[in-house]
Image (cartoon, rainbow, N blue to C red):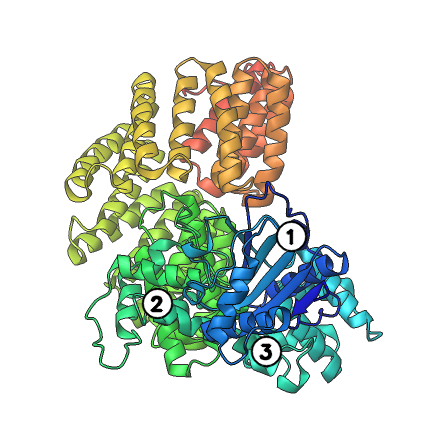
Amino acid sequence: MTWPQQAGVLPRQAHCFQDRATAQLLEHASYGVDTVVHTQVLTGFGGVGKSQLAAHHARTLWQAGKLDLLVWVTAVTRDAVVTGYAQAAVEILGADPTNPETAARTFLAWLEPKPSTVRRWLVVLDDLADPADLRNLWPPDSTHGRTLITTRRRDAALTGNSRQLVPVGLFTDDEATAYLTAALAAHDRHEPTDQLSGLANDVGNLPLALSQAAAYLLDVGLDCATYRHRLTDRARTLTDVLPDRSGLPDDQATNVAATWSLSIECADQLPPAGLARPMLQLAAMLDPNGIPAAVLASPPALNHLAQHHNAAPGQTHPDEITDAEATQALRALNRLSLIDHNPSSPHHTVRVHQLLQRAVRDPLPADQHGRLARTAADALMAAWPEVERDTSLAQALRANTEVLTLHAEDALYQPDAHLVLARTGRSLGEAGQTTAAVHYFQQLATDTQHHLGHDHLNTLTARHHLAYWRGDAGDVAGAAAALEDVLADMDRIQGPDHPGTLIARHELAGFRGDAGDVAGAAAALEDVLADMERVLGPDHLNTLIARHDLAGFRGQAGDVAGAAAAFEQLLADRKRVLGPDHPDTLYARHSLASFRGDAGDVAGAAAAFEQLLADRKRVLGPDHPDTLYARHSLASFRGDAGDVAGAAAALEDLLADIERVLGPDHLNTLIARHRLAGFRGQAGDVAGAAAAFEQLLADRKRVLGPDHPGTLATRHSLANLRGDAGDVAGAAAAFEQLLADRKRVLGPDHPDTLYARNRLAHWRRAAGDASVHQPPD
């Protein structure tokens, strides 16, 4: 026998093979006497190039003269493994070919290390379908030999006992773009780099998909941009935009769409049998970059598994599926590398490749696709907490809803708009992303009208949300105008006593008050409160909210003591109806503390906010907008109580967190900047405070408009600082203009208008106008 020897045929190296980090890892493995790892298992998603990496490694060792024996075995079944071993025994040892089992055992015995003979060998078991097929067929551990396995499986049997699992991932962005560039350049085709990188992203950097996409481009003669448009066209299936069997490159046997079918069948046979496929179908509707565990274990998800359980012949369908069985289904999919299941990451527990998702969705009939989309939406709603304490979970739920909306087409609007659509927009707004919420509801209102019509209740609701978040983002005048329009339609379509109509009236009054008409807002809220108590009852959540806002506007109109008394009664009722930790109860405590401070009990307000802040951190989390607002109020009242430097320092820390959570243009961010500049001025840095107010004024004009009460308040503070800095004539002139604008916007009797009159008189007298009498504060 002459050496070296090879048994079995290695796959031909793919054109434009990428020398990846995994290939280098294999090449650096040693064969010495100190070797601990004797078997390496390349595992990963179907189509990531495991066989190509194994073949490249084997070929590299063979051509470098580092092997005496190279054996390549296709290991899709136990019989195939036995046949491969037997062939090697026949060719190398002259074994009897008529008895494959005996020949295979002879071959394995020959691989056992022997002191008299040293032969360097590599056995490659390609595409192992089931680790159980290697029972009594594992090559032995040897200081001079090594086993390399490629498989989609990730079973525990493939690790330990000198076996190393080597995950094979997708191409990197650079590798994927380089592959496409080289594959097309080999045929004298050149495409813009941005189009190639975009195509790589479209197919998720999957090597198999990249090679087949390149082949399709060349065979059909499309440019990259046109092909990408076809690829993302939801009217086309994956098989429509990838080669048929005759056009597959590199001796590939199946196209992308068919690559994973066997793995799905195998996963569906693992215990609990029949659940893997319906679980994968549900995951195919959601975010490939991470699906929260709570979504896939929700009651709607478990009901879906029970209804679509692929029962084996003679097996009965279960009435219900448990959380544990759902988790087992995920583990089965993970064992076949169809998903990545990471229980330690609760918000991104399941990741699944976007092309596999499409391959799962494409064959579904339209009615089943629609039901699956609604089920996924139900699962998201079931997992969505009413109070979003965990911002990471909220982000993940929004991302999953966005992906679902793309896949669902019109299913989320049949027979009506699913609740998850509005919940996503609310989540954006409640997280402080009010501008994003406005854009979201603009699109939702358009889509709902398109699918359901102008007068559908869901369309009215979307328009209502749009108006509300416009106001919360600072456009209170636009919000009031939009609410007037939607209120007229609500009154016509659903009647004046419908809860939605009452809420719209309530919010319209609130935005008019925010725009300056405090007395008018209070009067309108009194009317709507009477109707709410009649229609909804005195303890209804919306009735309590109306009481809250009415008390607030009464306080803003000057009745601070009356507002505090109203909030005391409201707080008692909210504790009784909602409980002490409900966000609305905490909000009532916030308002009560504020008005007590405004009434003169500044130290008591600071103490109340200290306790409220602790409770909001516990209930809502440190980054919730309400928690940040409590920090702001606590710092402000501490400053009003005399600790000006401490208040400024606390507001500086708070401002960094508010900008991170809410963004630089959020109303609360602008308010915090206002208070910080004021306390800096009180601490003696008049010039620095004036500069801060100048910048803030420009930003408030840009974000809120010149007539917003917040913009006018900044002008007030800036004018005062000018006077404090010595420019008393400039201060008087600024207050003269401010007074005219406040009369026009807020009315002559508004407290802010009266305060501007007071300051104007003060600075006129300071400028030497003795004829001016100082009005009382």
Which amino acid type corresponds to the residue marked 3 in the rendered image?
A: Asn
Residue 338 vs residue 368: left or right?
A: right
Viewer-side residue, 68 vs 429: 68
> In the rendered structure, which disc, 1 or 3, sits on the residue that comes first in sequence?
1
Residue 99's label in the rendered image is: none
Residue 241 vs residue 717: left or right?
A: right
How far is the residue under mark 2 from the one under mark 3? 25 Å
Which residue is depicted at the point 44% across and 13% down?
Answer: 643
Residue 107 vs residue 613: left or right?
A: right
Other-residue count near label 3 (Cα within 10 Å), few / some / many at <14 / 14–19 / ≥20 = many
- Residue found at the very far right of the displayed protein: 188
How far is the residue under mark 1 from the one under mark 3? 43 Å
Let me know if residue 488 appears in the view: no
Which amino acid type corresponds to the residue marked 2 in the rendered image?
A: Leu
- Residue found at the very far bottom of the displayed protein: 246
How far is the residue under mark 1 from the one under mark 2? 42 Å
Q: Nearer the viewer, mark 1 or mark 3?
A: 1
Q: Secondary structure at mark 1?
A: loop
> In the rendered structure, which disc, 2 or 3, sits on the residue that comes first in sequence?
3
Tag 2 residue? 270
Tag 3 residue? 255
Other-residue count near label 1 (Cα within 10 Å), few / some / many at <14 / 14–19 / ≥20 = few
Viewer-side residue, 442 vs 508: 442
